[in-house]
């Protein structure tokens, strides 16, 4: 199968299209590419989208006001710099648009986008004083030192330190939506933040949909999950949390002291065990080596399309030592250079009539560091360093597996999409308690989540040099909905592996590899079961 | 927690001002994807601008039909899709860039890619940060509104062809960078 990246002509044609200089002959060639394979269609759409976004990001704020500008010249990159074309167009249609609601909308858009906001909100109230690995959902680059006006920040990846002009310091952990309200107030829509508000900055408030958290001279963390549920934990001093509820006019107030935590649902709260590692309180230490300084993301090119699931050789002791395993089914994979030596995996799978066994030796500069709490954050267990295996136990379906997360237009979910026999297994070592964690979800709709369910065993050992670990799990077939018909020797089912690495703090995701893949399919393994490689069950 | 949100209020309950703000908020967030969708189907910037204009008006006029809690982008692209088809019919020209089958196929592919597009857009800012200053400067110049490539060539005292060549190289590098960074969504599940 030809890789799009190996087709320079395709990219030449895309360049001609972006520059609006494409000839009929070139267009015919482009049509040929697009008709030949969906992967060219994907690359075509992605390239055009990149061009559109570049135009928006770099096109300049004056674009929308250039109503008297000449038509776009033939030799400059084309695109759409304006929010709404009518505001920027000189065509005859603008006359039509000048009337009625459309004009009102245009006026509104222009006001929101370009008119000066009220003077009070144009003053910077915070500074991005430090960051690591930050990716912002923003049209403009937000660099360290940036002065930030009131408004909503969307942090997609990394961790950021914001210093408010009141002196309060907030450490924001992705993914998060954090709205700067004033020098002494912010709204956390989702994600996690730790605020240190000492001395003169006392009185800082973090709002959420469920609570108003008032600092009384302290350091505290606030987490908001996608449903709005709020978690508050105090590291130092004291806070007062006013609980919000639609039907309550006077807020119930709770005070928390250092070492206490609580969960807040709508108008109600409950005490929670304090966990020191629940939040990132300081930015991770600067990386020791130059490679890490660049904060590149380790990733890989897939290497194998199948894994052998061998028969377990008698009794297997789950102790983090694979010496009693049949390791003949091993697959090996590593991240692309320069990470290969320190970010790699040897993966093993075995089976018997009761259990699926998953073993791995992972080279990891920060092994077994995860602080992702299975009790409060089961769905992001992968972030802190983990091994994920996706497996179909559907013997009648065989390989390749079917089932999709995303639906096409007008499409409804099929039984394949929601099959209980498609399992997403995430395994990590939870450092604070030393617990080998197991998280399982089913189907491509990710239903039926189980966190540390009954019946599994897991164990980890750290490499002697402290730069890797061995993990070993025995998972009963019942947890994979296959107890009545477990896979048998001779079966070829579907499976794939993801291995994730984190920073030393065990919370900040650094990168991953994906392997055991179907080379004939493209897409994300969490979204398309057809992308999974073969799990060949041996005698 | 998408911007579409979990509002419990129906559109009828909202004031005009709220409706305006709601629409602008949603449209601003999704406009890059809607426009990319239209461009992909038409493969012609002038035509795409025309259809985008009509689509934006149609979306505004039909906004009361949008159901809160559903996917605005998906709804908007469906509207855009019909506008594209209508545009192709109205033009009645035989010089359509793509045949009907390819347009339908591209529409389906683009719809499947939509969820990744937001991640790709987010990754783009990081990739621009990794460009060396000279490349970043050239890219910024080339995307500046109203500037011709030949003007840039003159400013930099370089042949026009060299500018095009560099622009292609930089865009390709950014494209590959975004591709590598969009490994992120995979990690989300």
Image: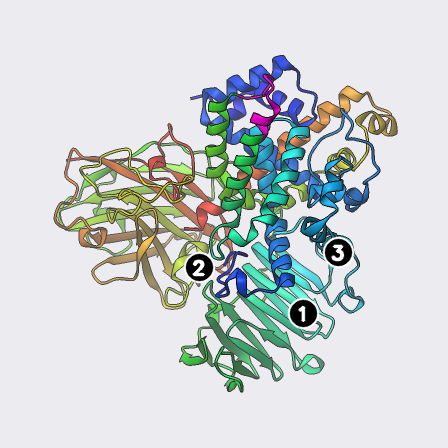
Q: Is residue A221 magenta?
A: no
Q: Chain of mark 2?
A: A
Q: Position of residue B164 (x, y in %)?
A: 73, 24
Dots 2 and 3 on the same chain: yes
Q: Position of residue A89 (x, y in %)?
A: 75, 38
Check disc 2 and report the residue beneath it: A369
| Residue drawn 69% across the image and 61% down it | A128
Q: Does B6 sit above or below residue B154?
A: below
Check disc 1 and report the residue beneath it: A181
Q: Can residue A295 be seen here? A: no
Closer to the observer: label 2 or label 3? 3
Closer to the observer: label 2 or label 1? 1
Question: In the picture, residue A10 is in which quadrant?
Answer: top right
Q: Position of residue B182 (x, y in %)?
A: 52, 42
Q: Chain of mark 3?
A: A
Disc 2 and disc 3: Cα gap in Å?
Answer: 49 Å
CA neighbours of label 1 inside 10 A, class few (<14), some (14 to 19), many (20+)? some
Check disc 3 and report the residue beneath it: A111
Mark 2 or mark 1: name the one nearer the start of the chain.
1
Q: Which quadrant does the C terminus of chain A fall into?
A: top left
| Residue drawn 43% across the image and 54% down it | A367
């Amino acid at each position: 199968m030809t890789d799009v990246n190996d087709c320079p002509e395709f990219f030449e044609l895309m360049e001609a299209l972006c520059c609006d200089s494409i000839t009929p002959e070139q267009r015919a060639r482009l049509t040929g590419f697009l008709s030949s394979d969906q992967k060219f269609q994907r690359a075509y759409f992605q390239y055009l989208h990149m061009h559109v976004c570049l135009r928006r990001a770099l096109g300049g704020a004056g674009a929308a006001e250039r109503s008297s500008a000449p038509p776009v010249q033939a030799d400059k990159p084309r695109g759409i710099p304006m929010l709404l074309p009518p505001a920027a167009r000189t065509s005859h249609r603008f006359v039509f648009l000048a009337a009625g609601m459309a004009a009102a909308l245009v006026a509104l858009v222009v006001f929101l986008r370009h008119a000066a906001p009220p003077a009070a909100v144009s003053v910077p109230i915070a500074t991005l004083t430090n960051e690591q690995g930050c990716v912002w959902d923003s049209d403009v680059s937000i660099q360290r030192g940036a002065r930030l006006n009131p408004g909503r920040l969307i942090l997609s990846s990394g961790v950021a330190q914001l210093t408010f002009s009141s002196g309060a310091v907030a450490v924001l952990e992705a993914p998060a939506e954090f709205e700067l309200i004033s020098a002494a107030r912010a709204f956390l829509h989702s994600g996690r933040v730790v605020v240190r508000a000492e001395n003169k900055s006392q009185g800082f408030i973090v709002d959420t949909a469920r609570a108003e958290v008032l600092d009384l001279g302290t350091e505290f963390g606030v987490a908001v999950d996608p449903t709005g549920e709020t978690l508050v934990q105090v590291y130092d001093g004291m806070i007062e949390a006013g609980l919000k509820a639609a039907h309550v006019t006077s807020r119930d107030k709770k005070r928390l002291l250092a070492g206490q935590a609580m969960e807040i649902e709508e108008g109600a709260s409950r005490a929670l065990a304090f966990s020191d590692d629940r939040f990132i309180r300081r930015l991770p230490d600067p990386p020791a080596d130059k490679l890490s300084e660049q904060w590149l993301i380790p990733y890989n090119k897939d290497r194998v399309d199948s894994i052998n699931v061998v028969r377990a050789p008698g009794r297997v002791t789950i102790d983090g030592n694979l010496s009693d395993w049949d390791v003949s089914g091993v697959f090996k994979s590593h991240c692309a250079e320069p990470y290969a030596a320190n970010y790699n995996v040897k993966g093993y799978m075995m089976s018997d009539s009761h259990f699926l066994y998953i073993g791995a030796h992972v080279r990891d500069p920060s092994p077994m560091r995860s602080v992702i709490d299975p009790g409060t954050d089961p769905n992001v267990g992968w972030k802190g360093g983990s091994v994920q295996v996706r497996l179909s136990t559907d013997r009648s379906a065989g390989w390749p597996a079917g089932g999709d997360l995303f639906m096409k237009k007008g499409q409804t979910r099929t039984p394949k999409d929601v099959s209980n026999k498609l399992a997403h297994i995430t395994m990590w070592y939870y450092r604070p308690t030393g617990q080998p964690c197991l998280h399982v979800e089913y189907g491509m709709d990710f239903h039926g989540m189980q966190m540390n369910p009954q019946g599994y065993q897991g164990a980890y050992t750290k490499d002697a040099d402290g730069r890797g670990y061995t993990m070993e799990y025995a998972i009963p077939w019942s947890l994979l909905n296959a107890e009545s018909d477990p896979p048998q020797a001779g079966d070829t089912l579907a499976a794939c592996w993801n291995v994730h690495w984190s920073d030393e703090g065990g919370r900040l995701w650094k990168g991953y590899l994906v392997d055991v893949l179907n080379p004939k399919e493209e897409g994300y393994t969490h979204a398309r079961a057809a992308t999974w490689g073969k799990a060949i069950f041996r005698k | 927690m998408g911007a579409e949100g979990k509002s419990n209020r129906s559109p009828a309950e909202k004031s005009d001002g709220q409706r305006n703000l709601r629409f602008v908020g949603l449209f601003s967030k999704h406009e890059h994807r809607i426009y990319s969708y239209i461009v992909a189907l038409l493969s012609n910037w002038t035509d795409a601008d025309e259809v985008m204009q009509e689509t934006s008006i149609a979306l505004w006029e039909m906004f009361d039909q949008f159901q809160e809690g559903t996917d605005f982008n998906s709804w908007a692209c469906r509207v855009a899709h019909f506008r594209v088809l209508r545009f192709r019919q109205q033009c009645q020209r035989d010089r359509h860039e793509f045949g009907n089958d390819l347009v339908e196929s591209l529409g389906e592919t683009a719809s499947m890619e939509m969820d990744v597009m937001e991640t790709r857009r987010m990754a783009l800012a990081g990739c621009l940060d990794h460009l060396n200053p000279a490349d970043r400067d050239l890219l910024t110049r080339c995307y500046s509104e109203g500037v011709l490539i030949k003007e840039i060539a003159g400013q930099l005292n370089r042949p026009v062809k060299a500018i095009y060549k560099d622009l292609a190289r930089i865009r390709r590098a950014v494209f590959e960078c975004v591709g590598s960074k969009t490994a992120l969504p995979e990690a989300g599940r």
